[in-house]
Amino acid sequence: METTLTPSALLNTLLLIERDHGRDRTREVPLGPRTLDLDLLYYADRQLDAPDLTLPHPRLHQRRFVLTPLADVAGAWRHPVAGKSVDEMLRNLDDGERVERLA
């Protein structure tokens, strides 16, 4: 997507959307189920390490459930720290996990 929002403003917008769809972060169990989970994975080639936002997402390269759909829309995007494309990161995962696409 394209936006004129700063990374922080975009994150705040995503959090508002989550809240508007019933997510209550004050009642969640860490790493537990969520009604909706919107993450800001990357913002162009920007690198950011702030208390409320790290870009690119610090575990993006470890999560097949993130990389698989990301490969569909931005497989050639290169991680600015790792230097690998989404497709390369996905091929290098050896986690035994699988992602099922639903129609």
Image (cartoon, helix red, strand yellow):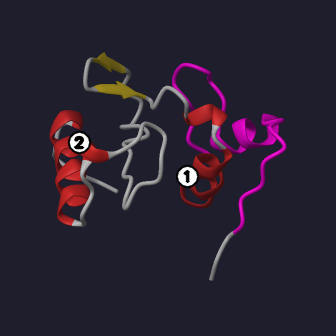
Tell me what residue is drawn at x 68 percent, y 46 percent.
Answer: 64
Residue 75 visible from this viewpoint: no
Look at label 2 and name its amino acid.
Answer: Thr
Q: Could you tell whether 5 is left or right of 50 in the image?
A: left
Look at label 1 and name its amino acid.
Answer: Ala
* Tag 1 residue: 74
* Tag 2 residue: 26
Q: Could you tell whether 35 is left or right of 3 in the image?
A: right
Residue range of the region highlighted in magenta in the rendering: 74-100
25 shown above or below 33: above
The x, y position of residue 73, in whole percent, is 54, 59
The x, y position of residue 84, in whole percent, is 66, 30
Quarter of the image for the N terminus: give it.
Answer: bottom left
Tell me what residue is drawn at x 62 percent, y 24 percent.
Answer: 83
Disc 2 crowd, CA 10 A, few/some/many (<14, 14-19, 20+): few
- Residue 93 part of the magenta-drawn span: yes
